[in-house]
Amino acid sequence: MTGVNLIPSRLLIQHAAKRRIRHWVAACLLLSGITLVPMAVEGQQQARIHRLKLKVIDIEGRLSAVRGQVGATAQAVLDADAELARAQALMTKRSWSGLLWLVSSCVPDAVWLTSITAPGPQGSQGRRAVGASRTSGRGRGKTVTLTKDAAGVAGPQRIVLAAPTELHVQGFALDHESLYDLMSQLKESDAFSSVMLVRAGMEPVFQGSAVRFVLTCKW
């Protein structure tokens, strides 16, 4: 039995052309998809990187603000320590007229004093800045330091108050018993935390001899 194709050849050619066009379109779409997927992934990664950069910038800004707050807090602590040091130094200052009267009231008749001195504190030198520095003190427990920076511009004055904390009392006593009476009265005055005998020895005085002594009275 012989089959006869009754479809016109023109329709067969059109049908084949349409099929080829569909194949080409499918292939183009597939190639486009393969190309666009990496581009989309790359775009997402770039957007994520941009967001991360914005977060880093924000964190750095916050970190700078925190550093500024820490610096301000540290400076406030230093200022508070300086104020506390000045307050403590002022608390150690004494009324010298009253103190001299107290010492003189404790001196027995057989004792006479030759000097009363208040040495300055040890190790109270200020820090030296870059450039020239000048320090002046007049025995009142104050140190004033005028510093200059590298450009030679004078900076603020740094004042350190440091009052003496002891007296050195020197004199003569006719005997050791009189010297003991002086030390006992100074201790009983409650003005000093300790009264120590630094040195005592017999020395010729006028036509006789007396006990030359050195006392240290601390408060």
Image (cartoon, helix red, strand yellow):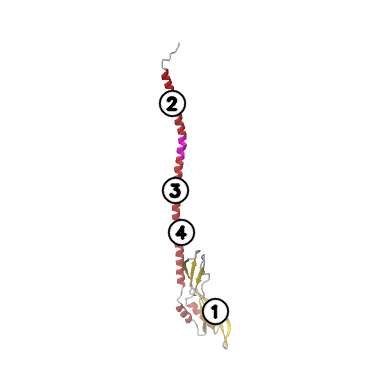
Give the residue number, with chain letter if any, for mark 3: 55
Q: Position of residue 210 (x, y in %)?
A: 56, 84
Circle 1 SS class: strand
Give the residue number, with chain letter if any, for mark 2: 21
Dominant secondary structure of the residues highlighted in magenta in the image: helix
Give the residue number, with chain letter if any, for mark 4: 71
Graded by Cα atoms within 10 Å as few (under 14), some (14 to 19) or many (20 or more), the crowding at tag 2 reads few
| Viewer-closest of 212 and 146 | 146
Q: Are marks 1 and 3 in contact (CB under 8 Å)?
A: no
Q: Is residue 151 above or below residue 63?
A: below
Marks 3 and 2, how far apart at CA: 50 Å
Three-letter amino acid code of the residue under disc 3: Lys
Residue positioned most to the top: 1
Name the N-terminal-most of marks 1 and 3. 3
Graded by Cα atoms within 10 Å as few (under 14), some (14 to 19) or many (20 or more), the crowding at tag 4 reads few
Q: Are marks 4 and 2 in contact (CB under 8 Å)?
A: no
* Residue 193 at least partly seen: no
Marks 4 and 2, how far apart at CA: 74 Å
Q: Is residue 9 above or below residue 91?
A: above
Q: Position of residue 182 (x, y in %)?
A: 51, 81
Q: Is residue 168 above or below residue 82?
A: below
Name the N-terminal-most of marks 4 and 2. 2
Q: Nearer the viewer, mark 4 or mark 1?
A: 4
Marks 4 and 3, how far apart at CA: 24 Å
Three-letter amino acid code of the residue under disc 4: Gly
* Corner quadrant of residue 201: bottom right
Name the N-terminal-most of marks 4 and 3. 3
Q: Which residue shows up at 46% across the image and 32% down it?
A: 31
- Left or right? Give the position of 161 relative to 207: left
Q: Position of residue 122 (x, y in %)?
A: 53, 71
Give the residue number, with chain letter if any, for mark 1: 214
Marks 4 and 1, how far apart at CA: 50 Å
